[in-house]
Image (tube, grey):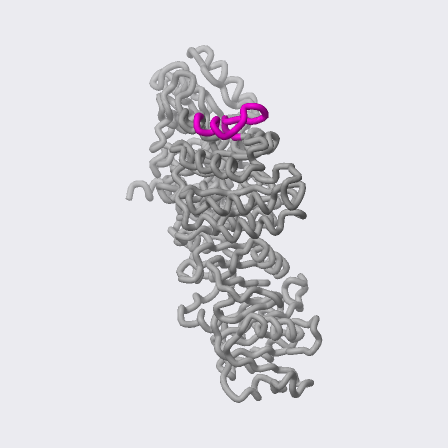
Amino acid sequence: MERDKIIHSILSKARQEKASALSEFEAKQLLSAIGIPICREKLVNLYANQELCAAAKEIGYPVVLKACGRKITHKTERSLVYLNIPSQDALLKAAKEIREKVSQDETEGLLVQEMLMARRELMFGYLQDELFGSCIVFGLGGILAEVLDDVTFRLTSLKEEEAQAMLGDFRTRKILGFFRGEEPVDRTALSQILLNLSKLENIAEINSVDLNPVVISKGRPIVVDALVTLNPRKAPSAFNKDDVPISLSVSKELWPYLFQPQKIAIVGFSRNITRPGYLIWKSIREIGFQGKVYLVNPKIREYEGYPVYPSIIEIPEPVETVFVCVAAPMVAQVKKEAGGKGARWLIVISSGFSELGTKEGRELEKEIFNTARQQGIRLIGPNCMGICCPKGGLAFFPQQRPVPGVVSFFSQSGSIASFYEVGMQDLNIPIAKLISLGNALDIGPEEILTYLKDDPDTEIITGYLEGAKKPRNLLNVLREIKKPVIIYKAGRSKSGGKAVVSHTGALAGTPRLWDGLFKQTGVISVDSVEELNEATAAFYYFKDKHLSGNKIAIITGQGGAGVSAADACDEFGFILATLNEETQQELQKIIPTAGTSIKNPIDLGFSSTAKEAFQQAILIIAHDPGVDLLLVVGGAPTFLGRQPFLFEEFAAWVGEIAPQIEKPIAACLVVSSLTQEAYQILYRHKIPVFGTVQRAIRALSHWYNYLSRR
């Protein structure tokens, strides 16, 4: 293809000359070859005034004049760009000044361009990140691109719908619409630039691309400046994709042995109630494991009527899953013995591996990984808590609930796995599966997500993520999942020590790329365990509810709570519903005029302490066609109930009428130390309840945004 010939010629020449970047002219030739619109321009000899004047005349005044060369990356900072040149005399004067500022060995000539008068400037970019691979950037451009920092990232390969979504994912996106008398930007043309840049992932030599600014002329984007930097290593101009899995895929036949095994062994069983071997034993007995359990410890012969074997080899029959709770140096030997007993899975609770940051720890990890591969055994861990699966009778901590649910959670932190499960108990949400991944030596988030996306017992996927060995594999898996995925990604610190010449590189960083990956795949991203729990509650309790829009009614007996809720709606993208005339007239019949408001937020005043008026008001508002969902704030101060605040009464009143309301209804109750019973009443009626209006609306916004993207 002609396109490939042009690209190959440009890059071959640059590689032969050991260039670290293309000149602007070369960059635009390459970009034009892949279908990116560039401005009209001509490159002339540095000292050829006659040729320079002829080029400007052909293009038409006014023109732009620039120094052009591979070593000149930031021309504006060096005053090597002259704009809006109106005449030949001015052109020659500008050329003379440029010659005085550059040396002949750093420039290949002067670049004459058409002068495009535009009020809107955008930025497009491409970047090869060490961890994430090739990425695309889009946002506000111009000389203040890095200062304004209004950009969004995605990973390649970019799909058409993902490119369109990028256009609405920066703060100043209104600039793409009608703007100071100018027509809207051609969004199809913008998304096509993104898709064309995405094709660069197949060209190994290219490290980054900056298209800044890209001006909008008559609604169409045109590139007026471009920088292409090259990878320092020699790389063939080939079309490569590195999609090699981190580890072997897990066959579907293996997963039941992990989550519903019939024969398990606990190696490193202990009578000490603080040791992992004892906790696993106690936990699976409490939750109701129905299969056979074999205990292994050479120092113990019997415990509570169960024989304790000196090693796995002594167990009289094959086992399917082995919990390993011995010291790190002993794990490899245990694994060899487990392989001899036909084990399919090892859940390595033991710590003392790569998490220590030592060479010895890494070597021990490598040893158990290699021998597991040889024996065909799969690993969870090491340095993990284990697995909780009520349906399979598995647990890793006492008092984990035996009731199977529809929410599954994976975690790269054992403690957060425990906290999350306790939090779900508080929210009255049963768990389907909970997997503590630990160091994720073999099975990581990618493999677990691959399983959960097709798991019939899992309707909602949640997770705590610290990192991924290969985010591109994670991208591919997340793209395939049709269920809601809610992830708390920790460790979003900036990538340090990057000295780059490109705007794209300067704007990039680990947090931005994770955000881009999540937005690209529809992941609900949260910033704390608390927010994770609350988002889970919204999705769980509303999983059978329909939401037609984002118009919300706030119902309260507290004026201040209504004001706070209105502020939160603005922050999280909800619109306060406008109640129609009929609704307002009906409310006026039951709500006194003084100290109340029938405008949304609706302040019921002391009517919120009277059951009949309170319930009737909620039903009237719920049937207003302009209301999509309701948030009822309880806790009116009074001495008529069990407490100074009507908490339990409020919960019971809302719960009674909930079956009559088809629209989603959520609740808010403050003073958590006094409201636990009220919370549980609401949960039993399938109503999510939150501690503040801000947290309630934030959680509801996660649910609404997910539904609106589907």
Q: Which residue is drawn at 54% across and 33% down?
A: 571
Up the image or down, 604 lies above or below 290; here it is above
Q: Which residue is drawn at 61% across and 49% down?
A: 491
Quadrant in which the N terminus appears: top left
Residue 707: % across, % down: 41, 43
Residue 152: % across, % down: 49, 37
Farthest left residue? 1
491 on left or right of 585? right
135 on left or right of 386? left
Residue 427 appears in the figure: yes
Up the image or down, 94 lies above or below 710; here it is above
Residue 234 appears in the figure: no
425 on left or right of 474? right
**Magenta extent:** 585-602
Residue 327: % across, % down: 67, 74
Q: Magenta region, mostly helix, strand or loop?
A: loop
Q: Residue at x 48, y 55 (%)?
A: 461
595 on left or right of 122? right
Up the image or down, 224 lies above or below 461; here it is above
Q: Which of 657 and 502 is in front in this view?
A: 657
Magenta stretch contains residue 587: yes
Magenta stretch contains residue 288: no
Up the image or down, 314 lies above or below 580; here it is below
Tally of numbered discs: 0
Quadrant in which the C terminus appears: top left
Residue 287: % across, % down: 56, 70
Q: Which residue is drawn at 48% across and 40% down?
A: 153
Q: Nearer the viewer, residue 109 or 20?
A: 20
Residue 119: image quadrant is: top left
